[in-house]
Image (cartoon, rainbow, N blue to C red):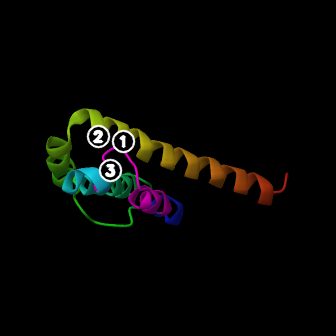
């Protein structure tokens, strides 16, 4: 879970992201929040959910506020973070496993 949360943290800390806080203010924080919620939502879709939260309403609410074109791009970032985590875990497993 930490690598995914690290991805969200990096996005929050980037001075320029899809909607920068420095120039756009609150909308810039909303896109950051959307990304974090989507990453948490992706974690819930795994085999062992870590949170028992229904995040559908906040996702729909933020989607209406910041627009579908931005949320589509943020969804891609969240998906890529999941893909990277999956590949990292697969490579780790290959390194530590031994052939039978």
The magenta stretch spans residue 59? no
Q: Are marks 3 and 1 in contact (CB under 8 Å)?
A: no
Q: Position of residue 80 (x, y in %)?
A: 49, 43
What residue is at 28 percent from the left and 57 percent from the top? 33
> How far apart are the alpha carbons under marks 3 and 1?
17 Å
Task: Give whichever of 15, 90 is nearer the camera.
Answer: 15
Q: Which residues are magenta?
A: 6-21
Q: Secondary structure at mark 3?
A: loop
Q: Are marks 1 and 2 in contact (CB under 8 Å)?
A: yes
Quadrant of the rendered structure where residue 30 is? bottom left
Q: Earlier in the sequence, mark 3 or mark 1?
A: 3
The magenta stretch spans residue 10? yes
Q: Which mark is residue 20?
A: 3
What residue is at 32 percent from the left and 50 percent from the top? 20
Q: Nearer the viewer, mark 3 or mark 2?
A: 3
What residue is at 66 percent from the left and 50 percent from the top? 90
Task: Give whichever of 65, 87 is nearer the camera.
Answer: 65
Q: Earlier in the sequence, mark 3 or mark 2?
A: 3
The residue carrying mark 2 is 71
Q: Position of residue 54 (x, y in %)?
A: 22, 58
What residue is at 56 percent from the left and 52 percent from the top? 85
Q: Residue furthest front?
A: 23
The residue carrying mark 1 is 75
Q: Secondary structure at mark 1?
A: helix
Q: Which mark is residue 14?
A: none
Relative to 60, residue 48 above or below:
below
- Please tell me how crowded label 2 is: few (under 14), some (14-19), or many (20+) other residues with Cα within 10 Å: many
Task: Give whichever of 63, 30 is nearer the camera.
Answer: 30
């Amino acid at each position: 879970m930490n690598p995914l949360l690290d991805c969200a943290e990096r996005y929050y800390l980037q001075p320029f992201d899809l909607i920068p806080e420095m120039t756009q203010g609150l909308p810039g924080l909303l896109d950051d929040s959307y990304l974090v919620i989507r990453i948490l939502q992706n974690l819930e879709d795994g085999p062992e959910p870590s949170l028992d939260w229904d995040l559908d309403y906040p996702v729909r609410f933020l989607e209406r506020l910041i627009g579908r074109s931005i949320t589509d791009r943020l969804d891609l970032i969240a998906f890529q973070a999941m893909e990277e985590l999956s590949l990292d875990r697969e490579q780790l497993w290959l390194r530590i496993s031994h052939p039978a």
